[in-house]
Amino acid sequence: MKELTKSNEDYLEAVYILELSGEKIKSVKIANMLAVSRPAVNRAMNELFDAGLVEKTDYSEISLTNEGRKKAKTVYHKHTLVKEFLIKLGVSEKTAEIDCCKIEHIISQETIEKIEIFTKFK
């Protein structure tokens, strides 16, 4: 499978967060959550569908495949871990949220592992 774009990682993460809330996942909810257009969501969902990461029903509901959920959990874990780390460093929650959305896409696995160790002891 080819590498996901930063944008597609964001869409995958959004589907995962909505899934965690127990809501039915529709493109309009994703569009609202990410402040993007519904056509943009539809394009992204088609790409994620083609990659085998989401499924779509006839009723326009979206769900993650097992592989999609696994990838989404990884992205979400990076997001929450980096945000927690930045807050522990004294960064405001608002700035930490903005920064972690950028960092989560480029951070190495080695750095993630070191942050995990650091945050367990702080």
Image (cartoon, rainbow, N blue to C red):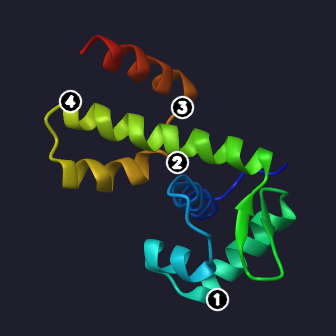
Most foreground residue, 45 or 66 = 66
Looking at the rendering, which quadrant does residue 61 occupy? bottom right
Residue 52: image location, x then y, percent: 85, 57
Q: Earlier in the sequence, mark 1 or mark 3?
A: 1
Q: Secondary structure at mark 1?
A: helix
In the rendered image, the vertical position of residue 57 relative to residue 72, given as above or below: below
Q: Which residue type does callout 3 highlight?
A: Ser
| Mark sitting on residue 39 | 1
Q: Which residue is mark 2?
A: 105
In the rendered image, the vertical position of residue 108 relative to residue 59, given as above or below: above
In the rendered image, the residue lying farthest to the front is 22
Q: Cα distance, mark 4 to mark 1?
A: 38 Å
Most foreground residue, 73 or 88 = 73
Residue 93: image location, x then y, percent: 20, 48
Q: What crowding class fits label 4: few (fewer than 14 Cα within 10 Å), some (14-19), or many (20 or more)?
A: some
Q: Which residue type does callout 4 highlight?
A: Lys
Q: What crowding class fits label 2: few (fewer than 14 Cα within 10 Å), some (14-19), or many (20 or more)?
A: some
Q: Cα distance, mark 2 to mark 1?
A: 23 Å
Residue 22: image location, x then y, percent: 55, 59
| Mark sitting on residue 79 | none
Q: Nearer the viewer, mark 4 or mark 2?
A: 4
In the rendered image, the vertical position of residue 36 relative to residue 105, given as above or below: below
Q: Cα distance, mark 4 to mark 2?
A: 20 Å
